[in-house]
Amino acid sequence: MAYYFKGAKILAPLSITSNEPVYDVDTVSLSKQRASQGAQRWELAFNTATSNDTEADMLVGVVEGITTASTMVMPQLPSVVKANTSSVVLPISANASAGSSSVSITSDGVISKGSFIKFSNHNKIYLVTASVGAGAVSVSLYPSLRSAVTTSHTFDTSNGPASAVTLNYYRDVSNLRGLTFTDGILSSTGTVNLVEALI
């Protein structure tokens, strides 16, 4: 399955990184102590295949709207998309509080380990850490829930082109670029770096 950014096809390699600050301290007895504040965001880096049809969108996209969040379909691993057989939108079968690392749902198929998912009341993307089958199941998630979910919300998955998992992102401002033309025909924006917008 192909994924797109501003109308241009995303090329491999695609980097999906979890940024979760962890503090590491050596004590005087040389034991390790590690702590996390529980904050986490996804960061993506990729190149695109720009064509004559998409280069204007790409140029406008790299210079406009730098202070606002945008959205795109969250890329999924091909093996995960192939293994998933569940519907795109599934009901939550029990309330889960903020800080929970699992959610109870009713699934009509397989949700594979490594799937990126969202909840209808969240902008945050979560990762399924263990595969589950059909029926009433508990889905293990990373990171822990930022806010509560209830049975009035839905568990949104990505199953091929019918994805309900959109990434809210900001462009990384440390590598702003324009468009580079080669031989007056081909154009490239270079590496695109995105950070999840935690709204």
Image (cartoon, rainbow, N blue to C red):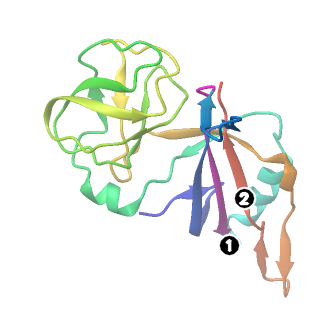
Question: Which of the 4 quarters of the picture holds residue 49?
Answer: bottom right
Question: Which of the 4 quarters of the picture holds residue 197?
Answer: top right
Please report the residue visible at 49 percent of the width from the left and 33 percent of the height from the top. 143
**Which disc is residue 23 wearing?**
none
Please report the residue visible at 21 percent of the width from the left and 48 percent of the height from the top. 85
- Of 56 and 120, the residue lying toward us: 120
Q: Is residue 55 left or right of residue 11?
A: right
Q: Amino acid at mark 2?
A: Val
Residue 88 visible in the picture: yes
- Magenta residue span: 37-48
Instruction: Categorize mark 2 by other alpha carbons within 10 Å: few (<14), some (14-19), many (20+).
Output: some
Instruction: Categorize mark 1 by other alpha carbons within 10 Å: few (<14), some (14-19), many (20+).
Output: some
Q: Which residue is mark 2?
A: 192
Query: Residue 198: horizontal and vertical position, in percent?
Result: 65, 29
Q: Amino acid at mark 1?
A: Ser
Decide whether residue 38 is among the magenta residues: yes
Query: Residue 140: horizontal and vertical position, in percent?
Result: 33, 33
**Which disc is residue 51 wearing?**
1
Q: Is residue 109 left or right of residue 127?
A: left
Please report the residue visible at 38 percent of the width from the left and 52 percent of the height from the top. 161
On screen, residue 47 above or below 170: below
On screen, residue 101 above or below 81: above
Looking at the rendered structure, the secondary structure element under dot 2 is strand
Q: Is residue 47 left or right of residue 107?
A: right
Q: CA distance from mark 2 to mark 1?
A: 16 Å
On screen, residue 199 above or below 116: above
Q: Earlier in the sequence, mark 2 or mark 1?
A: 1
Looking at the rendered structure, the secondary structure element under dot 1 is loop
In the picture, which quadrant includes the N terminus? bottom left
Q: Nearer the viewer, mark 2 or mark 1?
A: 2
Please report the residue visible at 75 percent of the width from the left and 59 percent of the height from the top. 58
